Amino acid sequence: MPEKKTKQEVKDEDVVYIGRKPVMSYVLAAVTQFNIGNSNKVVLKARGRAISKAVDVSEIVRNKFIQELKVDDIKIGTEEVKREDGSVSNVSSIEIYMSK
Amino acid sequence: MPEKKTKQEVKDEDVVYIGRKPVMSYVLAAVTQFNIGNSNKVVLKARGRAISKAVDVSEIVRNKFIQELKVDDIKIGTEEVKREDGSVSNVSSIEIYMSK
């Protein structure tokens, strides 16, 4: 996978962080980003249970809104999360790189 | 992504389907497959909410058990699922191709 290249090209404004809102909130955010943003790229980022939702968002945007969309790369990893009591736990993460 | 190549190389016995069991069940299944199987490949497949768990399994196998493991490819898609009442709904899917 072309890791370095993809990372260099992505700006902060192209990233949609997937959290606890309904799926369609993030679908709209991604579609809006493609339509009014200066870039033709969007990266979906999610951790833990939101990973499934990130895949849903990517598939809905591609199947229902922007047919010419391509998934360029998908990366998975592990991030350390600090809890309130100071302990550290690991959480899986995903990054879905899309462009049109 | 090298879709055709990857698909041809994968046999049914190399696939671990991620479902509702605890994460460590699938981690052990994947590690066992690498250690006693005839193949040096494993594919994790999951749908819906189990997608997050598939990423967990992949990361745990790679970080805790088989350090030399590589993630060769990750594919996402949409599958149609028939409910008991005959209606059809869409569910997201993931395939994580790993080899050592």
Image: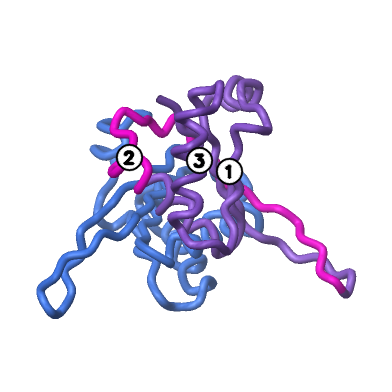
Chain colours: A purple, B blue
Residue nearest the observer in this picture, A39 or A88: A39
Q: In the rendered image, which residue does mark 2 sit on?
A: A65
Q: Residue furthest right?
A: A86
Q: In the rendered image, which residue does mark 3 sit on?
A: A96
What is the spatial separation of the Cα atoms under label 3 and label 1, in whole angstroms? Answer: 10 Å
Among the two numbered marks 3 and 2 on one chain, the one whose residue lies closer to the N terminus? 2
Among the two numbered marks 3 and 1 on one chain, the one whose residue lies closer to the N terminus? 1
* Secondary-structure class at tag 2: helix
Q: Is residue A35 above or below residue B88?
A: above
Mark 2 and mark 1 in contact (Cβ < 8 Å)?
no
Q: Chain of mark 1?
A: A
Can you tell which quarter of the image residue A48 is in?
A: bottom right
Discs 3 and 1 lie in a common subunit: yes
Question: Residue A67 shows which numbered tag?
Answer: none
Q: Residue at x 38, y 71 (%)?
A: B19
What amino acid is labelled 3 in the image? Ile
* Secondary-structure class at tag 1: strand
Among the two numbered marks 1 and 2 on one chain, the one whose residue lies closer to the N terminus? 1
Percent x, y for residue B45? 36, 57
**In the shown orientation, is residue B21 left or right of residue B92?**
right
Percent x, y for residue B98? 45, 46
Residue B40 is at least partly visible in this image: no
Percent x, y for residue B82? 16, 69
Q: Is residue A34 above or below residue B39?
A: above
What amino acid is labelled 1 in the image? Val
State which region is magenta.
A60-84
Q: Is residue B84 magenta?
A: no
Report crowding for label 1: few under 14, some 14 to 19, many 20 or more residues within 10 A (C-alpha). many
Q: Residue furthest left?
A: B86
